[in-house]
Every structure is written in structure tokens, then in C-alpha cells.
Image (cartoon, rainbow, N blue to C red):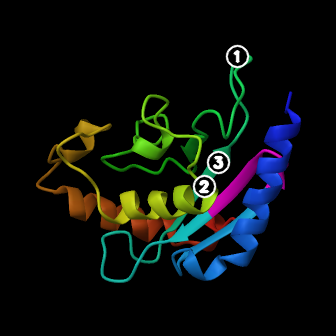
Amino acid sequence: MSTAFQMKRLQFEEQNLEENLDQLPPNCTYKKVSNQAYVVQYIGEKGTPHEGAYIVVDVDLCGSNGSPGFPAEAPNITFRNGFQHVNVYPMGKLCMYLSNKETFTSGTTLLEIFSGINQVIHHPTFHDPANASIMISEGGKGYDQKMRDQAKKLSQPQFKAI
């Protein structure tokens, strides 16, 4: 259950996003689906292995198991459509300091989170993989080629969410 502080903060976050759309990456759009959930869509940036892909993320601000949720704790960030990436766990959860319960700070805004997700997608950190198996060569395919193949699939209209 949300407290008065949480509701006020969520209103601030919504207003902050609306007023600062120009600070979001140009390939990022979002839709509020409930008081505590957003769908965020990124279109893979030109010149990257993700070029043209619809990369869709659910951002859930509710706490789990009775915990307070955002902004007291990191949101749950889950990729849809089987999106694979070196910094995304096989079940779709993002491995990122902005979604990590140990490193998250309550002053972090949704604008920073949405921008940070885009940064991780297009600039992976290979030294701390969440999904190391995706880096293993299959039939001579390297990581970038696997991402290009995935982008080709995810660029189809049925994967567009917004």
C-alpha cells in the first residue's frame, strides 16, 4: 500500500518526466500503465547491434513481499519478448546499479532510470555479465552478431508496444 509520501513522489516523477521529455534519449518512449507501473520502449540506436529493434521494458514501482517499493527501493525492471543481453539475466531482469537493491538511492528519478536503461542496452559491461552464456560463440557467431540477429527479429511490428 502506498503512503502519502510515495503518492506525492510518484506525482512528482510523472510531472518531471512530462516536463523533461527532451532529456530522455530520443529513441525512448514510455507509457504509464498504472499508478506504479510503466512500459518503456527503446528503439535500437542506429549503428549498434540493436539497430531498429523494439526493446520493451516493464518498470514496476511496487515493492515485493510487503516492502515499500519506489522510491524507498529500486524498481523491478523486466525486459519483454525474450530480450537477451549480457547485462540482462536470462529471466529478463536487468543487472544495473539503478535497479540493484544494494546500490539504489531514493533520490534516483525515473528520468535517470529510463535513461540509464538505454545506456546499459547500448553500452554493455562485459566485465560483470548477468548472462555470460550469451557471450559464448555458437557456430562462430560472436556476441554482436547474436544481437544483430535478435534486433532483426525484434524490429518486426508485432514487438512494438507503444
Q: What stretch is highlighted in magenta?
A: 33-40
x, y (%) of residue 121? 39, 60
Asked if the residue under mark 3 is in contact with the one under mark 1, i.e. CB atoms within 8 Å, the reply is: no
- Amino acid on which the number 3 mark rests in the picture: Val
Residue 162 visible: no
Q: How far apart are marks 2 and 3 (CA)?
A: 13 Å
Q: Disc 3 on helix, strand or loop?
A: strand
- Amino acid on which the number 2 mark rests in the picture: Thr
Q: Disc 2 on helix, strand or loop?
A: loop
Q: What's the residue at 70%, 68% (across, down)?
A: 17
Q: In this view, does 107 lie to the left or right of 151?
A: right
Q: Disc 1 on helix, strand or loop?
A: loop
Q: What's the residue at 84%, 48% (across, down)?
A: 8
x, y (%) of residue 108? 56, 50
Q: How far apart are marks 2 and 1 (CA)?
A: 23 Å
Q: Residue 34 carries which label?
A: none
Against 96, residue 12 (above or below) is: below
Q: In this view, does 90 lie to the left or right of 108?
A: left
Q: In this view, does 47 lie to the left or right of 28?
A: left
x, y (%) of residue 112? 53, 60
Give the main secondary structure, helix, strand or loop, of the magenta stretch: strand
Q: Residue 109 carries which label?
A: 2
Q: Name the residue under label 3.
A: 59
Q: Is residue 13 left or right of residue 76?
A: right
Does 105 appear in magenta? no
Q: Which label's residue is closer to the chain start, 1 or 3?
A: 3
Q: How crowded is mark 1: few (under 14 residues within 10 Å), some or many (20 or more)?
A: few
Asked if the residue under mark 3 is in contact with the one under mark 2, i.e. CB atoms within 8 Å, the reply is: no
Q: Residue 65 carries which label?
A: 1
